[in-house]
Image: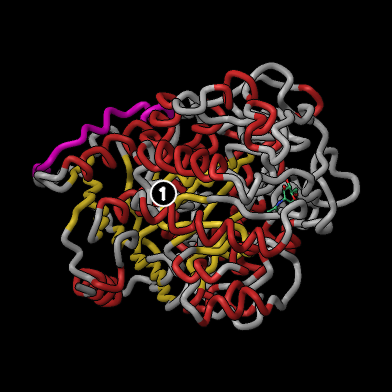
Amino acid sequence: MAKPVMSRLLAAAALGLPLVATPTAASAQPAAPPAALAGRSGASSDLPALSSVIPAPVEVTQFAGTTFRLGPATIIRTQPGSPESRAVGERFARELRPATGYKLPVVPVSPRFVPTIALLLGADDARLGDEGYRMSVGAASITVRANKPAGLYAGTRTLLQLLPKEIDSPTPVRRVWRIAGGSIVDYPRYAYRGAFLDEARHFHTPDEIKAYVDEISRFKVNYLHLHLSDDQGWRIQIDSWPKLTTVSGGAGTGVDGEGPGFLTKDQYREIVAYAAARYVTIVPEIDMPGHVNAAQVAYPELTCDGVAPPPRTDTEVGYSSLCIGSETTYRFVEDVIRELAAMTPGLYLHVGGDEAHATPEADYIAFEQRVLPLVAKYGKTAYGWNEITKAPAASAAVAQYWNTDTTNPTVAAAVTRGTKVVMSPANQAYLDMKYDPSTPLGLSWAGYIEVRTAYDWEPATRLAGVGESAILGVEAPLWSETLRSLDDIEFMAFPRLAGIAELGWSPASTHDWASFSARLGAYGPRWTLRDVNFYPSPQITWAQ
Ligand code: TNX
């Protein structure tokens, strides 16, 4: 179905219009319209080029001189008979209305001659998969086509970036709203593009989690991993073990005695639904067999001597362990996994497994051999930190690589047995590392991570023996020992998360720091307009 694109391209050529055709985003030039045309069409120099999008699309072809004008009469047309497509259209319209002040009705059919943004299924293009889309921007209409509604949603994320930055203003802005003409073909490199939030060290409220979902999904991130338990606190209601939250979700359970906080099941389900409406899947994590002090404070029978340990609000790691030989342990673990699986529609359930320094290695393996299959028993795919690859049962699981080394024979061996890997190397993907020594928040055990360090690595060559076919995707963890507010979260996540998102979505052939840093610099004012905090890295030339 390259036809409409081709015919417009040829039509443009036939009319003698300047034509900028670029096979990939990497080679695409920011195409400001030539002055004469700009004057005639009313396009202004702040018209974003099709190649300015983050993450970089797979293929971009811009037609100089053609623009679509979003105006008071524009309608949004969605696939007839598809409630999901309609919901994508409604959400997009709600995002466009505050700044434009236009009505932007969402309808299943569009009358002729009415400027239309059409969001349609039936792309019939296997390349696009479930999340890809194809877009063509002409003078009279924009058509986004996808195989699935998720692809239409991705297309609308792209369109938001193609509108002038003032589209992110919460109040009406009087200006002409144009989108550069051309076409885009776009689909993800990896199926899993994750963000992560530590709810245990400091609790972040449902509203804060939702705000983070909104922001990550703009960069086509499609998973949010929530770290729901640790030594300090337990942050998710479990009916069969109620003291987990009544005791360890209470006052003073955050780092340095902050708190209280936990998610009720209803709040969790609401977050799951909110994220799903933005094509983000929640991945819950309960960390075990280490990082369990909070559970043992609430239930002393989870220790081997039956004595409750003191509550801990410091940031030490590696001192707690479930009692591996005790059947009570497995009753507890199965109850938690069962209840968590029942309220989680997503495929993945994360069972931690990191830094179990207080668990002897043989015990650790015995524990994972029992626990990883329990996740499958409740219909989910087990997911854990890379230490789980010590256990043979990890061959059916997903391992999250968080170490900093470029070799890890245990992970490489697991990959030969079928384990899939999510790449989160701590010295590149950890959003809780300081940017530089002067960063007021964050830690530095894995080094300082400036924006370029977060962006300039290649997932498929980062770890020996873990190549492209073994990689499910990438994820950017944000641990919250030092982070309290949403402002803190945003300051550490942005702009680095945009870099990790691009590694996950864009073809390796588009990877280019000069291009990325220029696109990021142009993006900054959008965060400012949305009142999203970000680190104004000196590595980037920020637009005003
Ligand atoms: C290591 S990374 C941890 C967490 C800490 C984090 C701080 C990993 C799997 N475990 O317990 O919060 O470092 O950066």
The x, y position of residue 426, in whole percent, is: 72, 59
Residue at 79% over, 43% down: 442
Residue at 32% over, 51% down: 68
Could you say which quadrant of the image residue 390 lies in? bottom right
Q: Is residue 184 visible?
A: yes
Q: Is residue 311 left or right of residue 174?
A: right
State the extent of the magenta-drawn residues as a range.
Answer: 97-111
**Amino acid, disc 1:** Arg
Residue at 46% over, 50% down: 349
Q: Is residue 4 left or right of residue 165?
A: left
**Relative to residue 46, is residue 372 depicted above or below?**
below
Residue assigned mark 1: 157
Quadrant holding the N terminus: bottom left
Given residues 387 and 200, the one toward you in this image is 387
The x, y position of residue 471, in whole percent, is: 51, 72
Quadrant holding the C terminus: top right
**Relative to residue 472, is residue 535 depicted above or below?**
above
- The majority secondary structure of the magenta stretch comes to loop
